[in-house]
Amino acid sequence: MNYNIKGTDITVTPEIRDYLSKKLERFDKFMQAKDAARADVELSYLVGEAKMYRAEIMLFEQSLPSPLRAVAEGGVLY
């Protein structure tokens, strides 16, 4: 699977990239065309009353009728 990792208002360090790669490898067993599958990950830091981190993942694969999307927000990035 190909990974595109983007950081908005946050620096994507090698440690964060390794952490995400390990987590996203779990999707490989569900993908029929692993080489054609793609995951777009956007990490951001939300500045406001509650300072929070946000992660959004879009998963694209040929056998899926539409892309899968997941969003998580929390006080810590990990």
Image: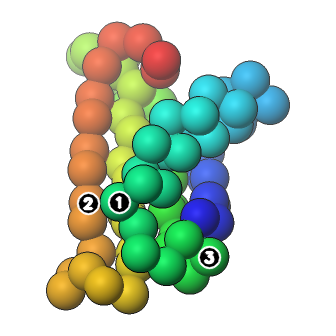
Q: Nearer the viewer, mark 1 or mark 2?
A: 1
Q: Nearer the viewer, mark 3 or mark 2?
A: 3
Q: Amino acid at mark 1?
A: Phe
> Which residue corresponds to mark 2?
69
Q: Quadrant of residue 49?
A: top left
Q: Residues within 10 Å of mark 2 (few under 14, many from 20)?
A: few
> Which residue corresponds to mark 1?
30
The residue that appears at 39% across and 40% down in the rendered structure is: 55
Q: Position of residue 15 (x, y in %)?
A: 74, 23
Q: Amino acid at mark 3?
A: Asp
> Which residue corresponds to mark 3?
35
- Does residue 42 show up? no
CA–CA distance between discs 3 and 2?
A: 19 Å
The secondary element bearing badge 2 is classed as: strand
- Is tag 3's residue or tag 1's residue first in the polypeptide sequence? 1
Q: Amino acid at mark 2?
A: Arg
Q: Quadrant of residue 47?
A: top left
Q: Position of residue 71 (x, y in %)?
A: 26, 44
- Does residue 71 show up? yes
- Is tag 3's residue or tag 2's residue first in the polypeptide sequence? 3
